[in-house]
């Protein structure tokens, strides 16, 4: 059994109209929400063993703030393949994870992450910014991740619903 943690990037800023979509930073609320999600990972006992993130600035900053807040000591793996990726493209990236890794956190974008969550769990869920979903996947190796067999939605956390 593996645990897949799916995290949409936190709220980004639109204050600099000249920036490309890929370069948009987090706004203040986004920074706070990412830190809250990191602390939540500790409280829930699900600190990831690997973090992989889109190279988009808002996704990578989300991953960095989450990692710092949860005490994640490893490197954050980045790939441009997660930027606006479709579910099958996300799965291809996740399949590259070492089979011994029990908990994997992916940080990326909608609509791909939301569609992936729905396909894996057969439960449509909205992934607002900084929403974290925990999915139990009945596989022994990440190379076996596919849709189906799918997974079970264990928990979903939305920043607006947290204390």
Image: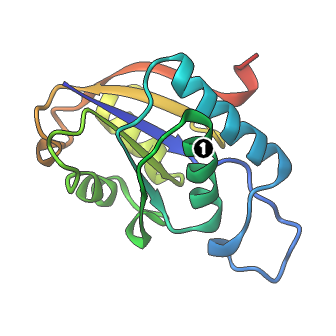
Residue at (67, 41) in percent of width and height: 34
- Please indicate whether residue 80 sits to the left or right of residue 31 in the image: left
Residue at (12, 39) in percent of width and height: 141
Mark 1 neighbour class, 10 Å CA radius: few under 14, some 14 to 19, many 20 or more:
some
Foreground residue among 71 and 142: 71
* Image quarter in which the N terminus is found: top left
Residue at (83, 65) in percent of width and height: 14
- Please indicate whether residue 159 sits to the left or right of residue 103 in the image: right
Q: Relative to 131, is 42 above or below?
A: above
Question: Total number of numbered labels?
Answer: 1
Q: Position of residue 35 (x, y in %)?
A: 69, 38
- The residue that mark 1 highlights is 68
Residue at (45, 45) in percent of width and height: 73
Foreground residue among 70 and 11: 70
Q: Relative to 143, is 148 above or below?
A: above
Question: What secondary structure is found at the residue carrying circle 1?
Answer: helix
Foreground residue among 108 and 73: 73
Q: Colour scheme used in the picture?
A: rainbow
Residue 90 shows up from this direction = yes
Q: Position of residue 93 (x, y in %)?
A: 28, 59
Residue 122 shows up from this direction = no
The image quarter containing residue 139 is top left
């Amino acid at each position: 059994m593996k645990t897949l943690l799916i995290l949409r990037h936190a709220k980004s800023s639109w204050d600099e109209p000249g920036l490309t979509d890929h370069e948009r930073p987090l706004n203040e609320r986004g920074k706070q929400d990412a830190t809250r999600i990191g602390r939540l990972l500790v409280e829930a006992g699900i600190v990831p063993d690997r973090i992989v993130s889109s190279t988009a600035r808002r996704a990578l900053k989300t991953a960095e703030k989450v990692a710092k807040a949860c005490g994640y000591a490893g490197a954050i793996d980045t790939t441009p393949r997660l930027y606006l990726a479709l579910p099958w493209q996300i799965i291809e990236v996740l399949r590259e994870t070492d089979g011994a890794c029990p908990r994997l956190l992916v940080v990326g974008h909608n609509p791909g992450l939301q569609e992936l969550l729905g396909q894996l769990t057969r439960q449509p869920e909205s992934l607002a910014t900084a929403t974290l979903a925990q999915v139990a996947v009945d596989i022994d190796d990440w190379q076996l991740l596919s849709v189906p067999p799918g997974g079970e939605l264990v928990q979903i956390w939305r920043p607006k619903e947290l204390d």
